[in-house]
Amino acid sequence: MVQDRKAAERETRKQLILQGALTVFKEKGLEGATIDEIARAAGFGKASLYYYFSSKEEIFNALLLQGWQILWRDLEEVALASGNPRQLFIAMLKRIAELVNADRPLYEFLFFAPRSFRAEEIQNGEWKAYQTRLYNVLLELIEQGVKEKQFPQMEPKIVLQALGGLFHGLVFWGADRTSITEDEIAEMLDKILQRN
Amino acid sequence: MVQDRKAAERETRKQLILQGALTVFKEKGLEGATIDEIARAAGFGKASLYYYFSSKEEIFNALLLQGWQILWRDLEEVALASGNPRQLFIAMLKRIAELVNADRPLYEFLFFAPRSFRAEEIQNGEWKAYQTRLYNVLLELIEQGVKEKQFPQMEPKIVLQALGGLFHGLVFWGADRTSITEDEIAEMLDKILQRN
DNA sequence: TTTATTTTCGAACGCTTAGTCGAAAACCTA
DNA sequence: TAGGTTTTCGACTAAGCGTTCGAAAATAAA
């Protein structure tokens, strides 16, 4: 069908635009990401963007949703694998680290951008459901792990909060960001989450 | 002297403006913090602000510098107290937590805002020296602590990075931010930084 | 009270940027 | 090739915001 090819092309162009948005975001930061620049980065005129997206917010929203969908699809596999809570938890963090390393700009956007946006449309976007799902899965793993004495005896929410911050720091902080390998993460987790 | 009183009043008004800036920042976020709103929050007309500060950047810069100065003055005391590296390190984190709890908006600004600003003037501001000093003191404490086997045998920079993220998470993340007490922090650190 | 100085601020300026419009170009169909 | 449809984009509009201007109000000095 011609229809199909048309739709596919439209989708491809939308992806190009999202890609451009990501590029600009990476180079200029969230505030510096203007529609004009995104258009140029994607190889379109400014007005053309509005043929594919109805607003700047919609672009960011689409980026967030798509990113979280991919992230979740990937992590779900890990979550459903077999192993005890501790193993699964570490496996998930490792997988997140792998993904982040494979496409840093995307995940910086996914993890940082939501804090910066104040718009309702974005704060209550569809992507949020995936974030919540991930949070709950990790929380349950910790709850189980604590119950089975595989983690220190602590309030799971606090542990997750702390590990979230820790992981965030591990993966995104520091001057030379390439210096932290998966092995280091695993080793670090092993030391910090030691049985007691 | 009349001169003196004048200078003091000028200083007081500058403080009012900084206070207003903080209020608006807290309510509207960094991007939403306009000169108009800051002026209104501080009880001045917009143009009056420029009688005290020459630009918006200068206002943020002054806020950062003053905040870090106060923070550092406070922490220096703790750093110079007696105790082994581990004790000193924990004491410093506890003190930071106390300070943050005492004036959350200020420290959110101090710790979050620098990431958002791209302006040279702010990125290379005087405040940065204090941040560096704090970083180095904490790093040395960890290096000493590792040497003396009071911390797990790990790369101090990584430990600090991780703890930075962790602490960040502990203090700033989560829905109900008041729920984390100093005691919990201490307990958490004790468990995580256990000797091995 | 008069004059000089400091302080305040509404209004205007200039620039940036999200979003629109209308027409041209590219493409498809017959 | 002719007519219709899809896609592109330069130019324009409108709004927001940092900054400046000029004059008025408040305060101090004489």
Image (spheres, coloured by chain):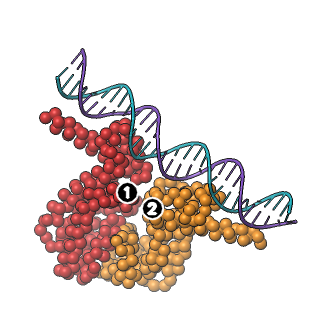
Chain colours: A orange, B red, C purple, D cyan
- Same subunit: marks 2 and 1: no
Which chain does the numbered disc 1 sit on?
A: B
Label 2, secondary structure: give it.
Answer: helix
Select label 2 or label 1 by which is in front.
Answer: 1
Looking at the image, which residue is at 68% across and 69% down? A9
Q: Quadrant of the C terminus of chain A?
A: bottom left
Position in image of residue B48 (x %, y %): 34, 38
The answer to whether residue B75 is seen in the rendering is yes
**Which residue has dot 1 on it?**
B119
Position in image of residue A185 (x %, y %): 37, 80
**A84, above or below A110, in the image:** below
**Which residue has dot 2 on it?**
A29
Number of marks in the image?
Answer: 2
Which of these two is toward me, C12 or B191? C12
Where on the picture, by quarter, is residue B188? bottom left
The answer to whether residue A122 is seen in the rendering is no
Where on the picture, by quarter, is residue B4? top left
Amino acid on which the number 2 mark rests in the picture = Gly
10 Å neighbourhood of mark 2: few (<14), some, or many (≥20)? Answer: some
Position in image of residue D16 (x %, y %): 48, 45
Locate residue A80 relative to residue B37 in the image: left or right. Answer: right
Which of these two is toward me, A154 or A44? A44
